[in-house]
Amino acid sequence: MPLPLLALALAAFAIGTSEFVIMGLLPDLSRDLHVSIPSAGLLVSGYAMGVVIGAPILAIATARLPRRAALLGLIGCYALGNLLCAVAPGYGLLMAARILTALCHGAFFGIGSIVAADLVPPSRRGQAIAIMFSGLTLANVLGVPAGTALGQAAGWRAAFWCVVGIAAAATAAIAWAVPRLPRPLAVGLLREFRAVGKPQVVLAMLISVVSSASLFSVFTYIAPMLEGVSLLSPHAVSWLLLLFGVGITAGNFLGGRLADWRLMPGVAGVQVALIATLALLTLSVHAAVPVACTLLLWGVLSFAVATPLQMRVVDAAPEAPNLVATLNQGAFNLGNAAGAWLGGLAIGAGVRYGALPWLGAALSGVALGLTGLAMALERGRGVV
């Protein structure tokens, strides 16, 4: 495993920890900053929208920079943003600092995935991207629980100080381990945006949005589902969420293998399996052991499409890899927000928590249809 990939994974670990640790610290933030829980929750929504908005802006701003320099600037800015979070005296500055960090998120993963793929032979590009993304998945298994425990014990600011340290270490690791790479070829902005409009690029990003929406339409409400339907204690729910995190870590590496083997057929197969798994969840949610097994399988499958779809957009638009790779990260985050919104609408309309996985299954069905359309276009007319 090349050291440069580990350096990128460490940066991804810092980003993932910072992104998600705040969810476990909302009550502490609410009390300390004297705001309501829903207002504190906007810090999560603000971050997600910052990724969506910042992705194209930062992609254009860094398009002509050497990729190693761009990565160093982005992770350095991420460390600064978390430093501002740690010292923020009030809600307003904390929100501004969260948005600053979010602006760097999509561009870092977009450029980082290209760098990771360039560091290995073509037959292992998917696995290289998966190694970088493993930092993000491990953040959910290790970083977020540890950061939440630290924040609850020593104050929420301590969690952000910890992220600052990890991001600083990642900056040093990238500076030391990632080699200087050739400057990207100069391509006009108009040509880059034309590449974004290619049918296969648009379809891949739509699949990213809908796949992410499928996950978050259910996962956003997983705690009340497990407590209210499975009748599990909050402590047991924490263990099942850890199990889900183990699943997405395994699924990330599975996705890397699929991307290097048969990319789009692999994505289609995962979507079929997701539909079946989410349908099964509506039955298994009523008992502890079956729901635990289903959550593990769901975790594996839900993240197995991330790396293949990231590779797909870059392969479909080789003349604008930075832009499309970064925009695809924004697409995933747009799906996060859309899925949570759709799940909330369903619950507000009277859908029971135990039936919510049917919404996720329906969205996976849409993703499967889009995948089939992309494959048909490629086979039938050679549209790229």
Image (cartoon, grey):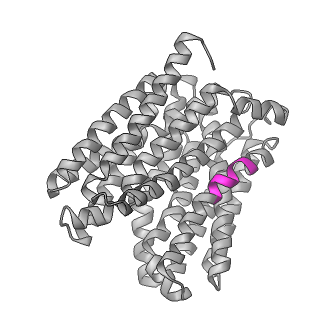
Please state if 52 lies on the left or on the right of 42 as rendered. right
Above or below: residue 122 compared with residue 43: above
Q: Which residue occupies the foreground of this view, 305 or 258?
A: 305
Q: Which residues are magenta?
A: 50-57
Residue at the farthest front position: 349
Q: Examine the rendering and report whether any part of residue 251 can be seen.
A: no
Image mark count: 0
Expressed as whole percent of the image width and height from the top left, the position of residue 250 reads 36, 43
Image quarter for residue 240? bottom left
Expressed as whole percent of the image width and height from the top left, the position of residue 304 reads 41, 38
Q: Which residue occupies the foreground of this view, 8 or 191?
A: 191
Q: Is residue 364 magenta?
A: no
Quadrant including the C terminus = top right
Q: Examine the rendering and report whether any part of residue 78 can be seen.
A: yes
Expressed as whole percent of the image width and height from the top left, the position of residue 104 reads 67, 56
Residue at the farthest top position: 380
Q: Residue at x 46, y 48 (%)?
A: 213
